[in-house]
Image (tube, rainbow, N blue to C red):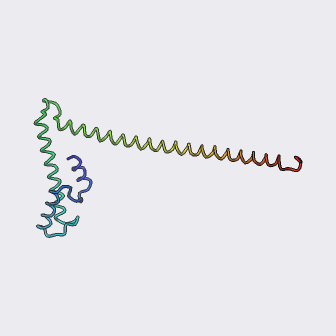
Amino acid sequence: MFQAQDDHEKNKDHQPGSSIGKKNKAILQKRAADDGSETSTSAAAGAVIEQIQIQQQLDDLRDEICRKFPAKPGEKNTWDKILDEREKRIAAKAEREKQEKIDAEERAERRRYMLIQLAQGVAVLVVIAGISAFLYWAATAGPAVR
């Protein structure tokens, strides 16, 4: 339900998410006699009705939870505790994702550094091998050796 509410808030001009929403949209289109585009009356009405339905479902859930798990006087009710816990988890997830991104960037930087060091080592070995080959050739192919 929270996900549906968040999705609705992110994109108010979205397609209806449920079969009931689709039926409502079709009925509204028929009664309003419009094309159902995002600027039509039926689309606006559908978005408002869907928001009201989502809020009503959340209110019903809140009432049911608070009835089943009543809070002591002076304490937060169970629904508020649930919302607080949800906010903590959202914040923790965002922090975890941020840390994972930083860690991935650090790993990429370490890999880049290691590849550069490896390339430098290979270059040094190639130069040493070239000098050694030249010195061997000079020592064995020159006229002073014969």
Q: Position of residue 55 (x, y in %)?
A: 16, 49
Looking at the image, which is closer to me, 37 or 125?
125
- The residue drawn where x is 56% and y is 42% is 114
- Position of 10 compared to 130: left or right? left
Residue farthest front in this picture? 146
- The residue drawn where x is 70% and y is 47% is 127
Up the image or down, 88 lies above or below 146; here it is: above
- Position of 108 compared to 50: left or right? right
Q: Position of residue 80 (x, y in %)?
A: 19, 37
Q: Position of residue 87 (x, y in %)?
A: 26, 40
- The residue drawn where x is 12% and y is 33% is 70
- The residue drawn where x is 15% and y is 52% is 52
Q: Position of residue 98 (x, y in %)?
A: 39, 43
Number of numbered discs overlaid on the protein picture: 0
- Position of 95 compared to 128: left or right? left
Where residue 115 sits, quadrant-wise, is top right
